[in-house]
Amino acid sequence: MKKSAKPVPSSNPRPQRRSASSPRPTPQANPIELLDGMWERIARKAYELYEQRGRQEGQALGDWLEAEAIVMEEIHEARE
């Protein structure tokens, strides 16, 4: 009868991989709250940018991010 060799522990163990069935992080339940009316301002500005580009599809995220930056700058300038 053969004896099976025991695995030798490594001095530098590799991190364990997460299995496909392990839980994944869930999106944040409570998103960051914007100032009153800020979401609407960003949405209006994003739509303006969309119209200025000739209503080209596929740029919604870019329009939103640019609009967000513009609105934030307007708010910052108004506070100075």
Image (cartoon, rainbow, N blue to C red):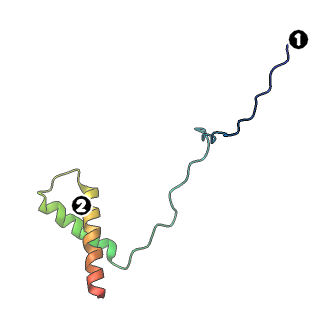
Residue 43 appears in view:
no
Please tell me which residue lies in front, 44 or 70.
70
Callout 2 amino acid = Asp
Please give left or right for residue 77 compared with residue 32 in the image. Answer: left
> Where residue 13 sits in the image (x, y, percent)?
67, 39
> Where residue 20 sits in the image (x, y, percent)?
58, 38
Q: Is 65 above or below relative to 2?
A: below
Residue 62 appears in view:
yes
Please tell me which residue lies in front, 2 or 51.
2
Please give left or right for residue 32 compared with residue 19 in the image. Answer: left
Q: Which residue is mark 1?
A: 1
Query: Helix or strand or loop: what does disc 2 sit on?
Result: helix
Which quarter of the rendered picture does the N terminus lie within?
top right
Which mark identifies residue 75?
none
Which quarter of the rendered picture does the C terminus lie within?
bottom left
Residue lying at 23% horizontally and 65% vertically, measured from the top left:
46
> Where residue 9 sits in the image (x, y, percent)?
74, 35
Callout 1 amino acid = Met
Which mark identifies residue 63?
2
